[in-house]
Image (tube, coloured by chain):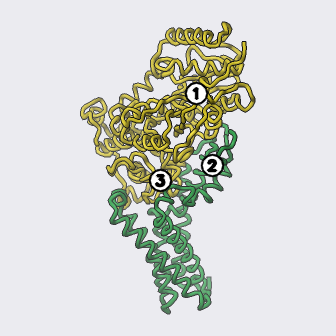
Amino acid sequence: MTAEPTKDILEERLGRLTPADIRKAVETFRAALGHQGAADLNACVHCGLCADTCHYALTSDEPENPPAYKVNLVMAVFKRYFTRLGRTVPGWVGARELDETLTREWVDVLFGRCSLCGRCNLNCSVGLNITALITAARAALTAIGLIPPELQSTITTAYTTGNNMGIAQNDWVETVQWLEEELQAETGDPTARMPLDLHGARMLYTVNPREPKFFPLSLLAAGKVFYAAGESWTLATDYYDVTNYGLYSGEAPVAGELSDRLVRTVERLGCQELILGECGHGFNANRWAAPEWLSKRYPFRVRSVLELLAEYIRDGRITLDPSKHTEPVTLHDPCNLVRLGGVVEAQRFVLRHAVQQFVEMTPNREKNFCCGGGGGQLAMTRYAQRRLQAGRIKADQIGATAAKVVATPCHNCMDQLSELNKEYKLGVAIKTVCELVAEALVLPAQ
Amino acid sequence: MAGLDPLRLAVLAAAAWCLAALVFQTVRAYRFGRHEIHSAAAGVSLKGIAYAFGPGMMPWGKESAARHLPTYLTGIGYHGAVFAALGYLVTVMSRVALPAEWRIPLTAVFAAGAAGGIGLLVKRAVKPVLRSISCPDDFAANVLVDLLLAAAIASLWIPGADTVLLATAALLFLYIPLGKIRHCFFFFYSRILFGIFFGRRGVLPPRPRESQP
């Protein structure tokens, strides 16, 4: 299966590469690798054992799919420009010039056949951080304009408008106000709030812009839970987008700026905590990567909303009635939140309190399979067929649980799972964890 | 330096070159950029490192090992034999005579290792996926190490074959920093970073199932 468009902006750019572009790409690549990347590329033994840990390789025999092949493409450039033998006898060590042919292959393979899920990292014989290596190569491509334009457009929209869906501020504010009225109606409490820019609130809550745009009830669910817990919280009128596709382009300055906006908002509103809504890559970006992009230690705590929900339950701040969900519910672990993020048990703890039958997928937790929607794949529509094909592993996993509901704490995963639901006729409902909690919530008596 | 003939001196010189070159490569790797870590840890790096070198290397800790158990076990045997051969090389270098009853067990270890090495070589040559990611260096590295194991066996049984072992060892040490065998050093570097990455994020070691968050 090859990428469909043959002559687009990307192709035109590929045809106009200059030696200066290549130099810039190599320099960017070097900087993005860092010492870990350099060590990893010196350590790889080409054993190929990572092949069948990758959902792309497991669902297609194409030789470009195994992680080892992808690493080899990256390593070829490393050897050519940064090792003695690679410079003198490139053929002996598999070193290659970053020319138009290899650049084209980098784009197709490193953007188009990897969701940066990190499953190969965990299973690598040596322990290479393969996602970091591929991200470094993506950074080099992005630096010379060789990022698929659909992914770049998502980043540009977030950068220029403040959120990746380009939602105008008045639309956002009106949506929140409407949801506040809904919350008041649902709780029967006219004082129930969906606060905006509440100075001194304990926590700032951030959301995936898909929520106000397409899934407002998801945001309402969070509001309902915070109301029940008596939380002091706020949304921000300007910067509320938890997503950060800069994580996938490797463009650290842009990614850093996107995350820094949230940091500045927390500081502006005087909050003590930044709570990241249900978004896998948003969690990885803002919890783990951003402090490194910004070279900054945060003076406030950063947590996933799942950790907060677990805390509410543990501390008795909310009460749930699991009989509201009698059908079997399974859980999809977003890679960036679980394997690369470390939030593993909170969502399970929450679901065991919110539903009657919680069924694990196999494998699960840090060993989960990617749904196929990560790495910017959902944005890069040119690779949609590959994405759906790679998602077969996840579809099979879901089918094996016989669950009727799939919970997933990530809107990106939700979109991909919804497509898999149709493609593989799974017949399941897909919900966020917050939605399931809100549905099981026993509201305090007025 | 009494007792050091030219061949033994050559081995020592090659080993010194190897060590110096690996140190140089480490410094070069560092120069790619090393940054202070700013994100607040959610787990313990040291626990991650301990896991990385312990349960994380086992088939039950690593799906790739479990799925490829014969290859995994062959690799373990191969590397074990290489380290044993290097240990034996030290005795040859220092002219320490091993007890005669060690000859058969050592031969078995080296032969098993060499057979494993040849098996991995054949696998690399035959399997399309492996062939597509291989270069001459991959084959040369394997052959060099197999030769070391064969020379070690010869040295155990054939009087005067020590010279073959010493020459092979010198060649191997010269080549290590140049080709993929440098993973013998960088494996530890990468594995430690792997442990730190997953350890401080609280991913590894895996927490007890059903534990409270």
Count residues near mark 2 (Cα–Cα under 10 Å), then give few for <14, some for 14-19, many for 20+. some
Instruction: Where is residue B16? Give x, y as percent.
Output: 56, 70
Disc 3 sits on a residue from what chain?
Answer: A
- The circle on residue A41 is 3
Tell me: A185 left or right of B69.
Answer: right
Numbered tag placed on residue B206 in the rendering: 2
Tell me: A404 left or right of B94: left
Residue A115 or residue A334, whichever sits in front: A334
Q: Quadrant of the N terminus of chain B?
A: bottom right
Q: Amino acid at mark 1?
A: Leu
Specify the amino acid type for callout 2.
Answer: Pro
Q: Nearer the viewer, mark 2 or mark 1?
A: 1
Mark number, residue A436:
1
Q: Residue at x 45, y 17 (%)?
A: A166
Give the structural element (helix, strand or loop) at label 1: helix
Q: CA distance from mark 3 to mark 2?
A: 27 Å
Q: Which chain gets the green colouring? A: B
Residue B78 against residue A7 in the figure, above or below:
below
